[in-house]
Image (cartoon, grey):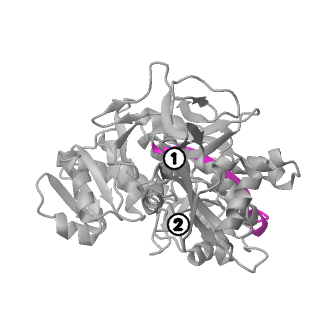
């Protein structure tokens, strides 16, 4: 199958229904209009003779048109982070030339005369027409490359992750076709170069759900758009939800009774934030979705009922489930392995491996990282409890090795966040002559607290080896725009050997 087939199905079923609306401009496009636009632009892409189609822009109506036009034309869609520097964007584009580039006016002017680039801003892309009236139908070859996404590069040079049509189709088919009611609307704030942004387009089109695009996130404006557009579902990263909760300080409710569901993911959700959010949105069901670019989005889910049970429970084990990422979705298997690749027992920490039809695990110029049995190493660390719930510790590379003992930064962060004075915490390893590595912590506080008090708190709740030897108080911890903690920035602050 080809992802363009989903759009054809939606146009046949709900051609007059609004598919996408730009919250900034007020412009909208129907499923029928989106189908015609994607068809027309697929011809333009096909005639250009390029190998890839690059998009460098904020969320707007051009995004879904370009994605489906690429699928129709058989040309990989390559959304790039518009927040990168000009040099960084140039380096990524050079890796996929010759390329058709859709961007904003400023970038179009900068790239207009580049070799092996056909450059349009969003307005000129709307106006450009193919020279031929013949419309080629899309390929139904499932192995064709649909999307190339550059990883965030937080631990090195960005890798170009490949998603073939079969991976995205497999993920999307977990949903029910044409299942959205007329009054349903999804608010999408995640950027178009994030896998969650790709997934939101595909699943919303397949379910025939109206999408409201919000190009930039600001909590009060997010709340206003959610009310004005009668939003019924949305996806946020933890830092977004934290800022929404903070903006509602002093209020008893967010006053959004029509908001039926909030999904969150992309980073670790602090327990105090999700508890407060569930109080502020009493009519809303919460879902924690964990996934990666290489897995075509979600692979585990902590559902609404599990959220409610954990919040109401007095059992610490059940309460802790709010910090998990839930159970595998249908068609996905999870395994946790040690450094030698052997499966570990329940509640033992290790590296997370995943297997399933939606898993790509392939990189351009590198090849597949999926082994002969279909398992992909996520490079995320964590453990599975006795009931199958997956808990994340962070990246496997972030594990602190203190005197030969592996320490999980995530576990220590969870304990620190439970302190009444701690808003957020980032734990890293720092050089130590005695231990090789020692524990260090950067802390955001909500009220005054001493280093000694926090060290005592960790010692009272964990073994003494987990107590941070150094603690720094930061005004704000460093996160990227998709909610990932920039742990390397924190490590640099503790880089000097003690």
Which residue is outermost to the bottom? 250
Q: Neighbour class for label 1 at 10 Å: few (<14), some, many (≥20)?
A: few
Query: In the rendered view, would you say 225 is above or below 130?
Result: below
Q: Mark 1 or mark 2, which is nearer the start of the sequence?
A: 1
As helix, strand or loop, the secondary structure at mark 1 comes to: loop
Image location (x, y in percent) of residue 469: 59, 57
Circles 2, 1 touching at the beta carbon (< 8 Å): no
Q: Residue at x 70, y 50 (%)?
A: 323
Residue 386 appears anywhere in the view: yes
Q: Name the foreground residue: 166 vs 1.
A: 166
Label at residue 372: none
Between the C-alphas of marks 2 and 1, the distance is 28 Å
Q: Relative to residue 458, is residue 426 drawn left or right?
A: left
Q: For residue 299, what is the image quadrant? A: top right
Quick one: quadrant of the N terminus?
Answer: top left
Comparing labels 2 and 1, the label whose residue is closer to the camera: 1
Label at residue 434: 1
Q: Name the foreground residue: 326 vs 319.
A: 319
Q: Residue at x 87, y 51 (%)?
A: 313
Residue 180 appears anywhere in the view: no
Label at residue 477: 2
Query: In the rendered view, would you say 350 is above or below 97?
Result: above
The magenta region covers: 278-293
Image location (x, y in percent) of residue 413: 63, 55
Image location (x, y in percent) of residue 260: 71, 60
Q: Residue at x 79, y 76 (%)?
A: 252
């Amino acid at each position: 199958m080809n992802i363009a087939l989903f759009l054809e199905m939606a146009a046949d079923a709900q051609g007059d229904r609004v598919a996408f609306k730009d919250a900034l401009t007020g412009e909208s496009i129907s499923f029928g209009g989106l189908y015609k636009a994607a068809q027309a632009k697929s011809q333009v892409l096909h005639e250009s003779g390029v190998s890839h189609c690059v998009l460098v822009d904020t969320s707007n109506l051009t995004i879904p048109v370009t994605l489906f036009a690429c699928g129709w034309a058989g040309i990989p869609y390559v959304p790039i982070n518009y927040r990168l520097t000009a040099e960084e964007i140039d380096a990524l584009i050079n890796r996929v030339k010759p390329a058709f580039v859709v961007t904003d006016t400023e970038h179009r002017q900068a790239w207009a005369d580049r070799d092996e680039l056909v450059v349009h801003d969003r307005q000129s892309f709307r106006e450009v027409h193919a020279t031929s009236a013949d419309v080629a139908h899309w390929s139904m070859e499932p192995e064709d490359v649909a999307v190339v996404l550059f990883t965030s590069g937080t631990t090195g040079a960005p890798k170009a992750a490949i998603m073939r049509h079969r991976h995205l189709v497999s993920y999307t088919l977990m949903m029910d076709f044409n299942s959205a009611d007329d009054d349903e609307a999804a608010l999408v704030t995640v950027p178009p170069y994030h896998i969650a942004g790709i997934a939101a387009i595909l699943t919303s089109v397949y379910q025939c759900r109206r999408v409201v695009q919000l190009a930039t996130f600001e909590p009060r404006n997010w709340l206003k758009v959610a009310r004005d557009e009668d939003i019924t579902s949305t996806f946020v990263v933890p830092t977004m939800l934290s800022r929404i909760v903070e903006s509602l300080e002093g209020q008893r409710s967010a006053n959004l009774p029509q908001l039926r569901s909030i999904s969150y993911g992309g980073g670790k959700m602090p327990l105090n934030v999700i508890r407060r959010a569930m109080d502020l949105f009493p009519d809303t069901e919460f879902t924690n979705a964990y996934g990666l670019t290489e897995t075509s989005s979600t692979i585990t889910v902590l559902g609404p009922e599990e959220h409610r049970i954990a919040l109401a429970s007095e059992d610490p084990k059940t309460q802790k489930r709010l910090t998990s990422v839930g159970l595998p979705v249908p068609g996905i298997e999870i395994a946790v392995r040690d450094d030698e690749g052997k499966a570990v027992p329940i509640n033992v920490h290790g590296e997370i491996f995943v297997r399933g039809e939606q898993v790509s695990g392939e990189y351009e110029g590198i090849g597949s990282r999926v082994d002969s049995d279909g398992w992909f190493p996520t490079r995320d660390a964590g453990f599975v409890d006795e009931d199958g719930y997956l808990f994340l510790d962070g990246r496997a590379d972030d594990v602190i090795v203190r005197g030969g003992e592996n320490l999980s930064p995530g576990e220590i962060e969870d304990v620190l966040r439970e302190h009444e004075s701690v808003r957020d915490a980032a734990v890293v390893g720092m050089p130590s002559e005695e231990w090789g590595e020692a524990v260090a912590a950067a802390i955001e506080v909500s009220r005054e607290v001493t280093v000694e008090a926090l060290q005592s708190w960790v010692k009272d709740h964990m073994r003494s080896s987990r107590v941070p030897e150094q603690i720094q108080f930061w005004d704000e911890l460093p996160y990227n725009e998709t909610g990932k903690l920039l742990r390397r920035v924190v490590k640099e602050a503790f880089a000097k050997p003690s």
